[in-house]
Image (tube, coloured by chain):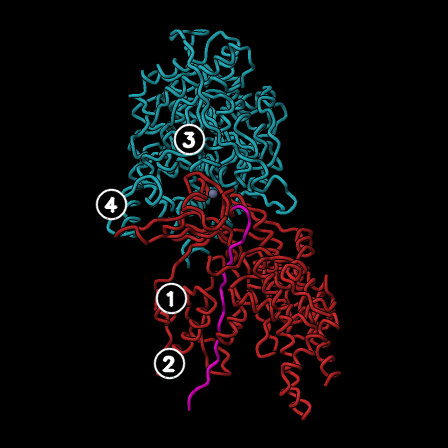
């Protein structure tokens, strides 16, 4: 009989804050600049320079921590983490060791319809390192780009509460959504503003003690995280099945080969020789400040989702989809403000809008028209100016040109024909041209009517009011 | 805990970066003005390079002498004695004369000039000077030219000070004799077979030898006060946080403090007026008002309570030093002060505490010298080898010793026993001072238990070298102000009197020092070179 195992995963997530300037100097933080243009003596670690804390970075950390339901410390300090690496100009990183800015929070995820609380152990603030460039530098040479050096970075450490790679992905997704809601980071894994390492272990189901963990690094996308963790769990299972022991080590995910490979063992683990940063004074975080940040915190996805259900009567599913990003939720809210049929708007946003965005690989903020334009389109349907079918055509045009729906309807002559005599003439013409079909209908073939209506729609290029066409046929047949 | 003040992160406007933009101005070109060489000008029987700041200020601002004349007199003296003293690592004759000419132009235009304007100053070579090499007397920084000025340098430049050049020190300010310079040892002007003290040996020797009117040094465990004492000049370590450390190449961040080395206490107060003050670039710089320090110099110390810590007169003290310092105590009593013996019971742990804390911080501060971005880089086959060889070849033995000590003290498994314990002792030592300062306005003690010793005397035995700082180190550990002034001689070698004060009560320290100086003549003695 094979043993059943429980998977235990904890994630360490690094998120770059989108402050205007770096953590300890005034250099800009913009992504994608020419190498080594956003640097100064301070972030280059020149002799004699000193760090000065960026207040905004502390504020953003507190904001993120509050959004993650953490306790913000009253007293916090920075420490030096010492290790030699060419992307680290001082050969130490200013980080936080025993007194992080925040501790003890949680994130709620829903797994198979059930809510699970994933604990957040701590949130601390530190500075980012530079980037090594190995390509096109010739043999035995590497270049360093220090633009990213000193960009504020928060590390969010979860409790080992995740029980599957899927949960890890859900947690990561939720974390990204929450942080995006707070506006403290762009949370883009592709640009490196969100990075994730994992601690993975397994233990026989029911066991109280943790198994030996491995640390998994180099996972560069959400999918990579799930894949790498699934691989690592299987690898550990196989080891235990063979009666061997899992080694405590750091492993890297190889995306091409879809495996994890050993990077360094326990013996090679760094001794970072942490000690309090003597160049900075400890922080006392006043409760007034924390309260002020708390007050300005926007609604988080969970609250917003609940509100959509409670106040607008949307189904849970709709509410969850619509709040999956702050921008989408903002877009939806703005639409509803201009067109209060909440469910109709939801159908359109989840159907047409998200369909279009997914097809084109775009973000909601890339849409060329405003929420009130979508509301305007829905009103045109209500007024009978256009049919639902034509509306979809108009929507595509809005996506292409960004023009207001009224303008598109006008320019393309898509206005519904509601003049009864005009449609009656076409109806009679169609009956004349299709005597066989008319006979079939009268003989009891209901389906024949559909064909006749279709002919009228064809003749009017879809502009005839379908209810009117139906009525006119029924009167004559 | 280091002597830093906790500040409320939310409500303290001056604390955060970016509120006051830092100016990075280039050097302004000044049209050279013609000057005639009245090089041998004398005032009151003294050559221009032998005068103090306050007298020179009067002479320059009144137009009686020009800054160019003073500057030339200083460089002439340098030409004359530098081969013997070897105080300077870098001379900026051209830059100095240019600045002097600018000041003279301002005077000629009838403009008011700053107290330090036009007066030549030597800078310890561990303070960054834009466009001028800054080596810390280390091979590892050979060829390094900073792209920015330290805050003290900015302040001096804004006062139109004339910077003569950069002076020698023990490598990275680690040492007590100036023999740890990677380039050459500096000699004591009173006896050139002896050391000038360290680490600011170049600063003290230059001032004593008349190769600068005054100098800036840095003091981590006595590095300003000790060489001042050995060279018979005035050297002050201000309260930690009074002077910005921005641009001072860090040795031990929680102990380092820049201070003046001058020929008398009045000059010292004048320099303090210029270099002290809050700097938004240094989070540990204090936001406290800076008084006019000369306002304390009234010569009146009547009723002032002076403590004499018995631990500073213990084993290993030269009887001549003890006699001179106790003589100074008598003098102060004679002037109306009330002196009484007191105790700082944790003094015996000062040296061991210091030699854990300072190396621990140094091991991290000096990690950046790796050959990647600036300074010396060794040829090597791969990255790790490059790191190792660069540091192996770039650092001298004392620096390596301290990096190893510090790395060890911070290592996992040893941290609690060493670094953490040392921090606790540091707290106890600060409490010692707090307690005595409840009863006394200031303390007096020797600056060093010994006078200047011969070159090579203590290099083989690091502990005997460390002992030289036994009376100065506690002051750094507590973050409080201390000054060394001349108070006697032993066989023609100067003896230093140390006055120690309460935090940010640097004024009282200067007041006591001035009263003593005003009523004695030790500071008027000049070495014969
Ligand atoms: Zn910078």
Instruction: Give the Cα distance between marks 3 and 2.
Output: 62 Å
Residue topped by disc 3? B130
Q: Choose the circle earlier in sequence order: 3 or 4.
A: 3
Task: Say whether mark 1 is within 8 Å of ligand 1.
Answer: no
Q: Which chain is cyan?
A: B
Labels 4 and 2 in the same subunit: no
Q: Nearer the viewer, residue A427 or A216?
A: A427
Q: Position of residue A62 (x, y in %)?
A: 60, 55
Q: Is residue A153 above or below residue A390?
A: above
Q: Tell me, yes or no, whether the highlighted magenta stretch contains residue A442.
A: no
Residue depicted at 32% across the width and 25% down the height: B187
Left or right of residue A107, residue A199 in this image: left
Tell me the tag on residue A238: 2
Q: Chain of mark 4?
A: B
Label 3 with label 2: CB-CB less than 8 Å = no
Q: Tell me, yes or no, whether the highlighted magenta stretch contains residue A10.
A: yes
Instruction: Give the Cα distance between marks 4 and 2.
Output: 47 Å
Residue density around tag 1, few if under 14, some if 14–19, many if 20 or more, within 10 Å:
some
Left or right of residue B255, residue B504 in this image: right
Left or right of residue B13, residue B285 in this image: left
Residue density around tag 3, few if under 14, some if 14–19, many if 20 or more, within 10 Å:
some
Judged from the image, the secondary structure of the residue bearing numbered disc 4 is loop
Rendering colour (chain A): red
Bounds of the magenta segment: A1-21
Tell me the tag on residue B379: 4
Q: Chain of mark 3?
A: B
Q: Choose the circle earlier in sequence order: 1 or 2.
A: 2
């Amino acid at each position: 009989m094979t043993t059943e195992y429980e998977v235990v995963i904890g994630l360490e997530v690094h998120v770059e804050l989108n402050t205007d300037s770096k953590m300890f100097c005034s250099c800009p933080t913009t992504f994608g600049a020419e190498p080594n243009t956003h640097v100064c003596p301070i972030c280059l670690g020149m002799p004699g320079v000193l760090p000065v804390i960026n207040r905004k970075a502390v504020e953003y950390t507190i904001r993120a921590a509050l959004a993650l339901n953490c306790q913000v410390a009253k007293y916090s300090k920075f420490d030096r983490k010492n290790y030699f690496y060419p992307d680290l100009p001082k050969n130490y990183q200013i980080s936080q060791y025993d007194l992080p800015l925040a501790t003890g929070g949680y994130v709620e995820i829903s797994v198979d319809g059930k809510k699970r609380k994933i604990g957040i152990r701590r949130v601390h603030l530190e500075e980012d390192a530079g980037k090594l460039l190995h390509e096109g530098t010739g043999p035995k040479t590497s270049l360093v780009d220090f633009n990213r050096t000193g960009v504020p970075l928060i590390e969010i450490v979860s409790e080992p509460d995740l029980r599957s790679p899927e949960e890890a992905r859900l947690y990561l997704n939720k974390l990204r959504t929450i942080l995006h809601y707070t506006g403290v980071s762009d949370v883009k894994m592709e640009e490196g503003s969100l990075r994730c390492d994992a601690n993975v272990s397994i233990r026989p189901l029911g066991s109280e003690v943790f198994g030996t963990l491995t640390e998994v690094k180099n996972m560069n996308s959400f999918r990579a995280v799930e894949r790498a963790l699934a691989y690592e769990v299987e690898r550990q299972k196989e080891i235990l099945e063979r009666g061997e022991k899992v080694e405590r080590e750091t492993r890297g995910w190889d995306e091409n080969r879809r495996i994890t490979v050993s990077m360094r063992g326990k013996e090679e683990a760094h001794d970072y020789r942490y000690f309090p940063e003597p160049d900075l004074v400890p922080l006392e975080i006043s409760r007034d400040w924390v309260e002020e940040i708390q007050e300005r915190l926007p609604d988080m996805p969970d609250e917003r989702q609940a509100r959509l259900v409670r106040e607008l009567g949307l189904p849970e599913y709709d509410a969850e989809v619509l709040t999956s990003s702050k921008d989408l939720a903002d877009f939806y809210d703005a639409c509803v403000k201009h067109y209060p049929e909440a469910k109709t708007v939801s159908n359109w946003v989840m159907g047409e809008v998200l369909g279009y965005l997914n097809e084109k690989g775009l973000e909601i903020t890339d849409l060329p028209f405003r929420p009130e334009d979508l509301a305007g389109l829905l009103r045109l349907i209500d007024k009978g100016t256009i049919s639902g079918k034509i509306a979809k055509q108009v929507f595509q045009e809005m996506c292409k040109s960004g023009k207001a729906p009224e303008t598109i309807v006008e320019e393309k002559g898509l206005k519904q024909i509601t003049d009864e005599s005009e449609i009656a003439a076409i109806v009679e013409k169609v009956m004349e041209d299709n005597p066989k079909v008319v006979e079939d209908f009268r003989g009891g073939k209901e389906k024949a009517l559909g064909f006749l209506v279709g002919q009228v729609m064809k003749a009017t290029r879809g502009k005839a009011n379908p209810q009117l066409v139906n009525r006119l046929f029924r009167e004559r047949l | 805990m280091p002597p830093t003040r906790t500040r409320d992160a939310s409500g303290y406007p001056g604390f955060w970066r970016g509120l006051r933009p830092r100016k990075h101005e280039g050097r302004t070109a000044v049209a050279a003005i013609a000057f005639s060489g009245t090089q041998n000008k004398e005032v009151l029987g003294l050559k221009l390079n032998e005068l103090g700041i306050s007298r020179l200020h009067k002479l320059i601002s009144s137009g009686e002498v020009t800054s160019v004349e003073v500057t030339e007199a200083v460089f002439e003296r340098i030409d004359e004695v530098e081969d013997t003293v070897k105080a300077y690592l870098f001379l900026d004759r051209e830059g100095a004369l240019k600045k002097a000419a600018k000041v003279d132009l301002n005077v000629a235009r009838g403009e008011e000039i700053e107290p330090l304007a036009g007066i030549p100053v030597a800078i310890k070579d561990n303070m960054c000077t834009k466009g001028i090499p800054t080596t810390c007397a280390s091979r590892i920084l050979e060829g390094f030219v900073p792209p920015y000025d330290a805050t003290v340098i900015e302040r001096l430049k804004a006062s139109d000070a004339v910077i003569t050049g950069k002076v020698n020190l023990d490598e990275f300010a680690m040492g007590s004799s100036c023999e740890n310079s990677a380039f050459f040892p500096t000699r004591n002007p009173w006896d050139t077979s002896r050391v000038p003290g360290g680490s600011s040996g170049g600063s003290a020797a230059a001032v004593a030898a008349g190769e600068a009117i005054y100098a800036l040094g840095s003091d981590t465990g006595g590095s300003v006060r000790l060489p001042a004492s050995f060279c018979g000049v005035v050297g002050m370590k201000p309260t930690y946080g009074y002077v910005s450390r921005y641009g001072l190449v860090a040795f031990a961040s929680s102990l380092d403090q820049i201070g003046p080395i001058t020929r008398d206490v009045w000059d010292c107060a004048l320099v303090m007026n210029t270099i002290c003050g809050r700097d938004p670039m240094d989070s540990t710089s204090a936001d406290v008002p800076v008084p006019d320090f000369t306002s304390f110099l009234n010569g009146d110390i009547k009723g002032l309570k002076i403590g004499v810590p018995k631990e500073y007169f213990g084993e290993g003290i030269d009887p001549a030093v003890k006699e001179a310092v106790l003589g100074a105590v008598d003098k102060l009593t004679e002037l109306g002060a009330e002196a009484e013996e007191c105790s700082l019971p944790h003094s015996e742990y000062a040296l061991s505490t210091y030699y854990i804390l300072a190396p621990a911080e140094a091991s991290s501060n000096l990690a950046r010298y790796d050959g990647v971005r600036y300074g010396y880089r060794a040829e090597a086959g791969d990255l790790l080898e490059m790191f190792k060889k660069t540091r192996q070849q770039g650092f001298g033995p004392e620096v390596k010793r301290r990096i190893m000590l510090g790395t060890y003290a911070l290592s996992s498994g040893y941290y609690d026993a060493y670094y953490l314990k040392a921090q606790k002792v540091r707290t106890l030592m600060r409490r010692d001072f707090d307690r005595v300062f409840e009863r006394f306005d200031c303390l007096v003690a020797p600056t060093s238990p010994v006078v200047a010793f011969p070159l090579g005397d203590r290099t083989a035995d690091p502990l005997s070298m460390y002992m030289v700082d036994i009376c100065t180190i506690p002051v750094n550990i507590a973050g409080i102000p201390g000054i060394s002034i001349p108070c006697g001689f032993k066989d023609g070698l100067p003896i230093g009197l140390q006055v120690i004060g309460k935090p940010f009560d640097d004024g009282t320290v200067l007041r006591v020092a001035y009263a003593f100086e005003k009523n004695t003549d030790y500071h008027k003695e000049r070495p014969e070179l």
